[in-house]
């Protein structure tokens, strides 16, 4: 089988240096798109910080209100209502340049999330010439599905996992009352929020990854089913890494959707594998 660059070279008669030049322009355009998003966010950093970044630690955040309203609608009292964030919850800056560097970090991460479909589109444009007509046929709408699953994962991290995690950590007490003052740092909060949102966004690409690996013959439905128990252990470890809080509730909030995505990946792999087998039978 020809290598990736060889297949591109056969199609477009480009040299290795030409491929590197093309890749450089794809990367540059992606970086420019991210920077444009970062600049827009940086120019509105106060609103973004108050309403989006600090959303999961505000008592009026949509996730807290929705859970509490659901609890009342089910007539189970305040069973689903999470305890309020302690009054006076503030983030601590420990360096002179801390707020400015965090503002830049927020801009870049936000720009990356906003520009993700375009960044993936640039990657797709670079890879596309190397694909055969058959591969192009089965990779139709790849940009749409990859982007949808990424945004679903990011939304899950921001609206579900983030509030549970930060609410638990904000209300966790160590030692006797009054002997310990909890003041999380600004950088630590941003790092945790970034890990949760981007980690869930990447983790939700599991069905897409299963589809691709099955198409190119690296995995099979039997392989995914046979090693299911080991996959669950890996998923549990990933859940523990994504969630900064040590409580089992937050880890289960990540673990259960990832298990569902893994089972969805098995179903996707079975359908793809069955379709390939039917095509091979028809070819023979």
Image: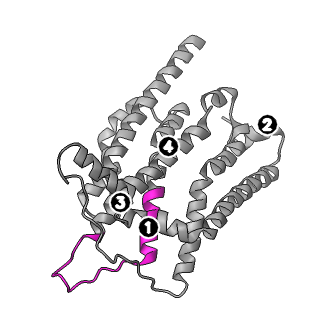
Earlier in the chain: of badge 1 and badge 3, it is: 1
Magenta stretch?
170-198
Earlier in the chain: of badge 4 and badge 1, it is: 1
Q: Which of the two marks, 4 or 1, is nearer to us in this view?
A: 1
Q: Is residue 196 magenta?
A: yes
The answer for how far apart the CA atoms under marks 1 and 2 are is 52 Å
The answer for how far apart the CA atoms under marks 4 and 3 are is 20 Å
The answer for how far apart the CA atoms under marks 4 and 2 are is 33 Å
The answer for how far apart the CA atoms under marks 1 and 3 are is 10 Å
Residue 191 image position (x, y, % from top left): 45, 69
Q: Secondary structure at mark 4?
A: helix
Q: Which mark is residue 77?
A: none
Q: Residue at x 45, y 30 (%)?
A: 268
Classify residue 158 by image quadrant. Answer: bottom left
Q: Which of the two marks, 4 or 3, is nearer to us in this view?
A: 3
Residue 188 image position (x, y, % from top left): 42, 74
Earlier in the chain: of badge 4 and badge 2, it is: 2
Earlier in the chain: of badge 3 and badge 2, it is: 2
Residue at image mark 4: 149
Quarter of the image where the C terminus is located: top right
Residue 63 falls left or right of residue 218: left
Residue 80 image position (x, y, % from top left): 23, 52
| 31 to 50, vertically: above or below | above
Q: Is residue 188 magenta?
A: yes
Residue at image mark 3: 163
Residue at image mark 2: 10
The answer for how far apart the CA atoms under marks 4 and 1 are is 24 Å
Earlier in the chain: of badge 4 and badge 3, it is: 4
Q: Which of the two marks, 3 or 2, is nearer to us in this view?
A: 3
Residue 15 falls left or right of residue 149: right
Residue at image mark 1: 54
């Amino acid at each position: 089988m020809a290598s990736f660059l060889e297949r591109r070279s056969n199609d477009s008669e480009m040299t290795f240096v030409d491929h590197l030049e093309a890749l450089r322009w794809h990367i540059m355009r992606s970086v420019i798109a991210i920077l444009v998003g970062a600049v827009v966010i940086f120019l509105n950093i106060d609103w973004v910080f108050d309403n989006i970044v600090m959303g999961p630690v505000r008592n009026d955040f949509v996730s807290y209100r929705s859970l509490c309203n659901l609890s009342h609608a089910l007539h189970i009292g305040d069973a689903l209502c999470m305890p309020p964030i302690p009054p006076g919850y503030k983030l601590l800056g420990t360096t002179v340049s801390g707020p400015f560097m965090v503002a830049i970090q927020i801009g870049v991460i936000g720009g990356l999330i906003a520009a993700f479909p375009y960044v993936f589109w640039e990657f797709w444009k670079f890879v596309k010439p190397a694909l055969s007509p058959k591969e192009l046929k089965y990779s139709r709408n790849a940009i749409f599905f990859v982007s949808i699953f990424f945004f679903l994962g990011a939304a899950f991290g921001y609206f579900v996992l983030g509030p549970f995690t930060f609410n638990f950590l904000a209300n966790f007490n160590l030692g006797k009352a009054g002997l310990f003052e909890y003041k999380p740092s600004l950088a630590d909060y941003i790092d945790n929020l970034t890990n949760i949102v981007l980690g869930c966004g990447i983790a939700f690409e599991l069905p897409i990854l299963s589809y691709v690996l099955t198409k190119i013959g690296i995995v099979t439905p039997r392989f995914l089913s046979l090693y299911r128990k080991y996959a669950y252990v890996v998923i549990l470890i990933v859940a523990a890494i994504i969630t900064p809080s040590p409580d089992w509730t937050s880890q289960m909030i990540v673990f259960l959707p990832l298990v569902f995505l893994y089972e969805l990946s098995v179903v996707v792999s079975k359908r793809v594998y069955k379709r390939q087998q039917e095509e091979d039978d028809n070819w023979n």
